[in-house]
Amino acid sequence: MIRPQNHIVVTLSILMLLFTAMDCRAQSIGSLEGTGIQAGIGFLPGVGIQVAYFDAKRMYVRDVVFYTHLQPGIFENSGSLQISGSLGAAVRIIGILETIGAMSPRLFDVHLGARIGPGLTFAFDESSLEKNQRFSLTLEPLARFVQEVGGRRYYMELGIVRPSLRFGLLFSL
C-alpha cells in the first residue's frame, strides 16, 4: 500500500522536474481565451484518463470534466474503477497579474480553482455493503500549470480526485 506521504514527495519531485524542463523552451503563450478541450492522463495513485471542455476568459476558466480512474489491486487489498464528472472554475493568476500590469508577456499560466461533481466507484471484490456505497460527491481544490512548448499547450494539474496528478494537452476550438 502506498502511503500519502510518499505521494506528496513523488508529486513534488515530478512537478519540479517538469517545471524545469518546460521553462527551458518557454515561449509567450498569449491569453488562451476561448473554448477548447483538455485531454490527458493521470497518475498517483493508480492511472486514469481526464477529458474536459473549458471556456477560458482573461482572469478565469470554467470547465466540465470527466475522469476515469483505475486502481489496480497491487496498491490496496482490492482494486477499483472510479468514474466521475464535475463542474469547476479557476482563477487565472497570471491573467490577473497581466490586468494590473504586474507581468507581461505571459510565458506560462497558473490556475487555482475548485470542482464539484458526482462519482461512482466499483470495487473488484466489493461486498453487498460496498455496492450500496458506490456513489460519492466530491469537492476538489485544484492547481493547474499551462505551458506552450513547440507550438503545443501542455498542462499539469494537481487535485484530490484520483488520479491526483494529471498531464495532457489543451486544444483550442
Image (cartoon, grey):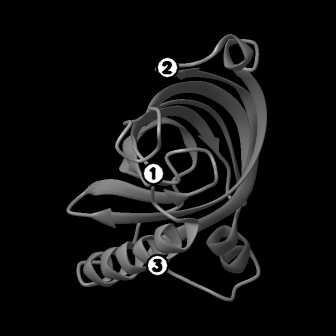
Q: Residue at x 49, y 35 (%)?
A: 36
For disc 2, the marked residue is 125
Q: Position of residue 141 (x, y in %)?
A: 73, 56
Is 166 on the left-hand or right-hand side of 96?
A: left
Element type at marker 2? loop
The correct choice, above or below, for 173 with respect to 58 in the image is above
Could you classify mark 2 by the number of other residues whose Cα lies within 10 Å: few (under 14), some (14-19), or many (20 or more)? few
Task: Using the numbered discs, state the Cα–Cα distance from disc 2 to disc 1 in whole angstroms.
Answer: 19 Å
Instruction: Say which label, 2 or 1, has the lower sequence index.
Output: 1
Element type at marker 3? helix
Q: Residue at x 55, y 74 (%)?
A: 5
Q: Position of residue 132 (x, y in %)?
A: 75, 13
For disc 1, the marked residue is 45
Instruction: Say which label, 2 or 3, has the lower sequence index.
Output: 3
Q: Residue at x 42, y 57 (%)?
A: 155
Residue at the far bottom in the pictured view: 102
Along the line of sight, which residue is nearer the eye, 121 or 58?
A: 121
Element type at marker 1? loop
Q: Which mark is residue 14?
A: none
The correct choice, above or below, for 111 with respect to 47 in the image is below
Q: Position of residue 22 (x, y in %)?
A: 30, 75
Amino acid type at image mark 1:
Pro
Instruction: Say which label, 1 or 3, has the lower sequence index.
Output: 3
Amino acid type at image mark 2:
Asp
Between disc 2 and disc 3, the foreground one is 2
Q: Which mark is residue 9?
A: 3
Picture quadrant of residue 28 = bottom left
Could you classify mark 3 by the number of other residues whose Cα lies within 10 Å: few (under 14), some (14-19), or many (20 or more)? few
Tell whether label 3 touches label 2 (CB within 8 Å): no
